[in-house]
Amino acid sequence: MNTRTGSRRPPFFQQMFPQTSMNYGSSEKNALLRASIRRRPSGHWKNVGVARQPEVDEVIPVVICASEERLGATMATINSVRSNTDQPVFFYIVTLRDAVTETRRYIEETQLKGIKYKILEFNPMVLRGKVKPDSSRPDLLHPLNFVRFYLPLLGINHKRVIYLDDDVIVQGDIRDLFRVKMKPGHAAAFATDCDLPSTHEMVRSIGMQTTYMGFLDYRKQEVKDLGINPNDCSFNPGVFVADLSEWKKQKITKHLEKWMEDNFRLNIYSSAMAGGVATPPMLIVFHNKYTKLDPLWNVRHLGWSPDARYSESFLQEAHLLHWNGPFKPWRYPAVHMASWEKWFIPDPCGEFSLIRPESDE
């Protein structure tokens, strides 16, 4: 028997379009975000709308999402980042309305209270007409999965930012990831799914997809017309560095939205395929147009099987561990839970708790 988590309700697709009165006439950015205007303690920046924005290159900006039912995961990621670097880091924490207060309490009432951060409230209404329900993998339809599409609209005053999923632990110095040399004209840097030999056995054993064939439906003419070889290596968009100037210049967000809207009408890819509906647009838009990260900055597949494990020596070499897949380290069963749990901070609200086997006691 297992202990149970404290998440109160599943805020997935059924909560994406709440009944609310919003003014969408001001700007695209204002439609994207609802401002959370609360004052920070002295000595820290304040939150949206009244904060002094950190200067460009003054700190390392990290964007991470915080869903209500996975707050403990987000805080573990933040804790691992700030604990393994001497460089100042500024966290842009994107959440939904139901988790704003709890997110702030999790930070202010724990050892994270000294971090520099801003809470941004994402407006899921911007996804209307772009994402539709799919019962096969509802967790991948969470509105926050699409925040990565809208990075330049978050009001971030930096040339480049790091985006992290909430199911990662950073073991290296985030400064090294931030300083990756981007190729001219590239708007992002990702780790490919084929460049780390130590993961090949894991991939084969659990049947992971590492090529475009696993993410796009090549029976569709719209996919064939792309001219992308189905055997081309895919990449993982859960960890990346973005050049916001290039992103804006190339209108990346509009291209991503175009593919979302096409899929809404034509079902070019569905959440039944690998990566759900958030990964394929990224694969299409950035095909052959991204800088490759050192693969040790995204050692993944840790969440795809409760049995397949990496060697401890390999885990120690990894700069970043990624539990992408259904078997998350805060639940049970899962693998390499100790590597995640060492960064876990108990929820002061008592809403998030680990799922673990009951002890003999």
Image: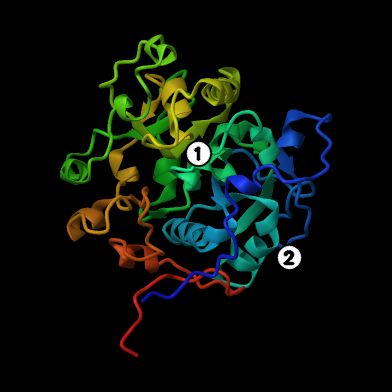
Q: Nearer the viewer, residue 62 or 359?
A: 359
The image quarter containing residue 212 is top left
Residue 62 in the image, given as x and y percentages of width and height:
53, 46
**Quadrant of the image for the C terminus?**
bottom left
Q: Nearer the viewer, residue 82 or 299?
A: 299
Return the mark for residue 134.
1
Which secondary structure, mark 2? Answer: loop
Give the answer, above or below, for where 308 lies relative to 357.
above
Give the colour scheme of this rendering: rainbow
Give the mark nearer the N terminus: 1 vs 2: 2
Residue 70 in the image, given as x and y percentages of width and height:
52, 59
**Quadrant of the image for the N terminus?**
bottom left
Residue type at mark 1: give it: Asp
The residue depicted at 72 percent of the width and 46 percent of the height is: 18
Circle 2 crowding by C-alpha within 10 Å: few under 14, some 14–19, many from 20: few
Q: Does residue 58 appear anywhere in the picture?
A: no
Residue 353 in the image, given as x and y percentages of width and height:
49, 71
Side of 44 where 210 appears, left or right: left
Spot the residue most to the front. Answer: 135
Side of 242 where 25 appears, left or right: right
Return the mark for residue 218.
none
Which secondary structure, mark 1? Answer: loop
From the image, tell me which residue sits under label 2.
Answer: 41
Give the answer, above or below, for where 186 lies relative to 33.
above
Give the answer, above or below, for where 240 lies relative to 317.
above
